[in-house]
Amino acid sequence: MPAPAAEDPVELLRLGAQLLGQGRPAEAAAPLYRAVALNPGGVDAHYILGLAQQGLGQHELAMASYARAIELYPAGHAEAHNNLGNVLQSLGRCEEALSTSMQRSPPSRATPWR
């Protein structure tokens, strides 16, 4: 795959998602951070960055990315709620995880690259 245009957040997001899908979260992080920097309102960029951070064991950063995705998509980002709860549970913060799951939004529609 050719390198994405350095200033195109959609292409950077796609590259990051592809690398993450290949089990390469460390390599996925850089284009995802850049995608977020270029488009701070990009819901999917925050969510997928959270996946990469979680894969790297960067739990606090992942929680912040998931929380931002939820904040940016108030209609509901069930995946972000679910993963936020999973990170909290993995850190032994079960009460918070339960609270997060109880606040979860309805399942989100399949709308890639919001």
Image (cartoon, helix red, strand yellow):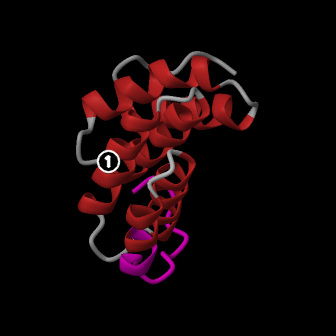
Q: Under tag 1, what secondary structure?
A: loop
Q: Is residue 104 shown above or below 89?
A: below
Any magenta on residue 103? yes
Q: Give the quarter of the figure containing the C terminus.
A: bottom left
Q: Give the quarter of the figure containing the N terminus.
A: top right
Res. 81 image quadrant: bottom left
Residue visible at 32% across and 43% down in the picture: 64
In-image side of 4 versus 20 (left or right):
left
Residue 103 pos. (x, y %): 36, 78
Q: Which residue matches tag 1?
A: 42
Foreground residue among 97 and 23 = 97
Disc 1 packing (10 Å; few <14; some 14–19; many ≥20): many
The answer, for residue 8, to whether it is visible in the render is no
Any magenta on residue 45? no
Residue visible at 49% across and 66% down in the picture: 111
Of helix, strand and loop, which mostly describes the magenta segment? loop
Give the residues in magenta.
100-114
Q: Is residue 95 shown above or below 3?
A: below
Res. 57 image quadrant: top right
- Please name the amino acid that badge 1 sits on: Gly
Residue visible at 59% across and 19% down in the picture: 26
Residue 110 pos. (x, y %): 55, 70
Foreground residue among 53 and 100 = 100
Foreground residue among 18 and 52 = 52
Residue 61 pos. (x, y %): 37, 34
In-image side of 1 versus 101 (left or right):
right
Q: Is residue 76 shown above or below 69?
A: below
